[in-house]
Image: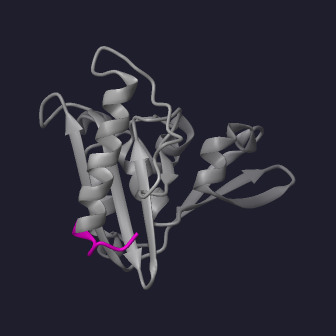
Amino acid sequence: VDANETPPLVAALARREGPNTLRNASTIGGAVAEADPESELLAALLVHEAEVTVARPDGTTEVPLGELLSDPSLLEGGIITSVSIAIGGETASARTGRTPADTSIVAVAGRIVGEGTRVAVTGVADTPILVDPADLTGLTPPADFRGTSEYRRELADVLSKRVVGQLGGAS
């Protein structure tokens, strides 16, 4: 995807990835490798069906971002050379932070294409994850000074419903 084709959701959430001094020196591959649990950019990439190309001495492989986030050993001995995403569809996002400029406590990104809806949530697991917005009962978010596990679970539920509503109510 060239800069003119970058989906608006990916562009907007990339701007939230960190201060501009860090963004100017970082890469999407670096954000993927870091796998920050609160990365809104990773949530956007998940809903845009990101595929990560990992190069190793014995060749390259493409791995869906969700698999890579759940199994970081898939990066061992390799380097990320590209990240490809699907474009099109309608997107929406919602977040809650202590302040508008602060890192989100929980954020949700969603995308609908045809009959399919993809929803990703940050701040509720070790990495951003794809979820079924109709059933978030299995979430066991971490707790910290910004909120309890129950608070984060409730935020995920409220924000997921908000995003699905913005996408026309499909789930």
**Horizontally, is 129 left or right of 153 in the view?**
right
Q: Quick one: which residue is furthest to the left in this view?
A: 100
Q: Position of residue 42 (x, y in %)?
A: 44, 49
Does 102 lie within the magenta span? no
Q: Nearer the viewer, residue 134 or 143?
A: 134
Does 169 lie within the magenta span? yes
Question: Looking at the figure, which quarter contains the C terminus?
Answer: bottom left
Q: Quick one: which residue is furthest to the right in this view?
A: 58
Q: Position of residue 154 (x, y in %)?
A: 32, 38
Instruction: Name the residue at 69% across, 53% down.
Output: 54
Instruction: Name the residue at 56% across, 40% down.
Output: 33
Can residue 24 be seen?
no
Magenta portion: prevailing SS class: loop
Give, as a single range, the part of the protein colored magenta: 166-171
Can residue 85 be seen?
yes
Q: Which quarter of the picture shows residue 106?
A: top left
Q: Is residue 90 above or below residue 157?
A: below
Q: Nearer the viewer, residue 144 or 72?
A: 144
Q: Quick one: which residue is furthest to the bottom in this view?
A: 114
**Horizontally, is 110 left or right of 103 in the view?**
right
Q: Position of residue 32 (x, y in %)?
A: 52, 45
Q: Position of residue 70 (x, y in %)?
A: 64, 42
Q: Which quarter of the picture shows residue 169?
A: bottom left
Q: Which quarter of the picture shows residue 155?
A: top left
What colouring does the structure picture have?
one colour
Question: Looking at the figure, which quarter contains the N terminus?
Answer: bottom left
Q: Nearer the viewer, residue 25 or 143?
A: 143
Q: Is residue 160 above or below residue 156?
A: below
